[in-house]
Image (cartoon, rainbow, N blue to C red):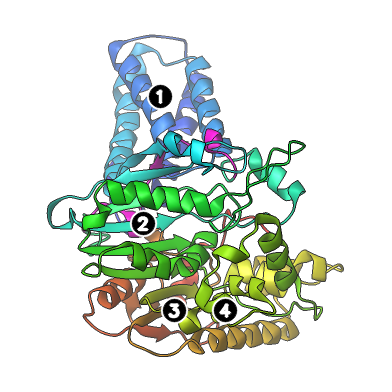
Amino acid sequence: MPCHHSHSHSHAAVVRIFLILFGLQEDWAHKTKRIKTPEIMLFQSIVALLSVALPVHLGFTIHQHDMIQHMHIHLLRNDLHPSRMIGARLRQWLSLLTCLLILLKAEGGSVEITYLQNVVAKGAVCLDGSPPAYHFDKGFGTGVNNWLVHMEGGGWCESVETCLSRKKTDLGSSKQMVKQFGFSGLLSSQKKSNPDFYNWNRIKVRYCDGSSFTGEVEAVNPGDSLYFRGNRIWEAIIDDLLAKGMRNAKNAILSGCSAGGLASILHCDRFRALLPATTKVKCISDAGFFIHAKDVSGGQHIENFYGQVAKLHGSVKNLPASCTSRMRMRPELCFFPQYVVQTMQTPIFFINAAYDSWQIKNILAPSAADSGKAWKSCKLDLKKCTPGQLKIIQDFRAQFLSALTGAGSSPSRGMFIDSCYAHCQAGKQITWSSNNSPAVGNTKIAKAVGDWYYERSPVQKIDCPYPCNPTCQNTDSESQVPDI
């Protein structure tokens, strides 16, 4: 069978082909007896390798990784094929495997984890006391002195109870993190899909503190053994990267998605200050512009939530001083980007959906403000919203754009604001630069970011209102970011 490759479908195709292989195997196993041949054993070895590499490559969670492992065990336990059937069936399987390997290569390889064990003594630790971690894919060629530091997202924890829950996952413990992580989108090493940054030093900073890297509490309650040290983690990782060559960077970007996208805003000017004046430093926030808005009941759900996060983690002292000095009565409000960016000095680019799916689900219509569940269907699919709900959502978009554009229109501020119902779009190939990626004014995210960073042209693209953009149809609106 021919293997047709397109970046727009490769991520989904990898998963689909892998599952087809197991489906073929199961159908065959029911009809055959166990026979071992060199060809069969080779095939099993390849699938065994893929059962580990595929979930790692795609950045699956520990739970999803375990599911794939279970599928592989099921494969090995099933009876295999009679030799008389090897020819046609094995060719079918190997053809699928060949396609799978081609697609994996096109997406780029997985990157090994690095644990900073030496900073544990300084108290730079995850919620459970384990060492911080990151994945580092070294730059090459013309990108050897360029650095892109991307911070993972994953929501926040605002109470001891929610932080204890995170402590048992990869969002609170490096012990639970996968050892390798697949880089794609903005972090891809493939020139075709990531032409402006493919050969940079690319780092994915793992998120395990629950405070967007702002926490700083010295005391540890022996009753819960929770460590609120997000700021120390950030400083320790940046120090480590500086020592590994980033201090000589020609170009440098601090970026992040969701809670990491918020962190890229909160830490942007500090990042600039740690690098030489000769380094071209800019920041990118992907789905990190969370707005200060009331929920559908008229309550201040997100304001109260961020206030609890800041209090629990001792975050205020690590929020940008340029903001907290102006907001002395309510310094915790500097968790909201709209108040921070007004005085930011470093150039920054905002990638965001005007109808950010996480914000609509958790800022506009959180479950706590929707006891009658009138918004349940609408939040899952905007097509199921009532006319009244759509009016409220359009008003929310207007609030978002007002907060964003209120930060100023300097050419150093770039933006790509599409009308998709999505959250985090730079880290996935399908939304970053594939054939079916969202476009605003015929420009896709990867080109918009590259044009802005290299100053090929100013980029401040704001999409028309929903549902005007047909390129949003293939955007994945689901996210692994926890609800609040």
| SS of the residue under disc 3 | loop
Closer to us: mark 4 or mark 3?
Answer: 4
Circle 4 residue: 325
- Mark 1 in CB contact with mark 4 (< 8 angstroms): no
46 relative to 448, above or below: above
Q: Earlier in the sequence, mark 1 or mark 4?
A: 1
Circle 1 residue: 48
Q: For residue 50, which quarter of the picture? A: top left
Query: Is any atom of residue 270 visible in this view?
Result: yes
79 relative to 333, above or below: above
| SS of the residue under disc 4 | loop
The N terminus lies in quadrant? top left
Circle 3 residue: 344
Specify few, some or many for label 1: CA neighbours under 10 Å numbering under 14, 14-19, or 20 or more. some
Q: Earlier in the sequence, mark 3 or mark 1?
A: 1
The amino acid type of the residue labelled 4 equals Ser
- Mark 3 in CB contact with mark 1 (< 8 angstroms): no
The amino acid type of the residue labelled 2 equals Val
Whole-number angstrom distance, CA of label 2 to CA of label 4: 28 Å
Q: Earlier in the sequence, mark 3 or mark 2?
A: 2
Residue occupying image coordinates x 40% and y 63%? 255
Circle 2 residue: 149
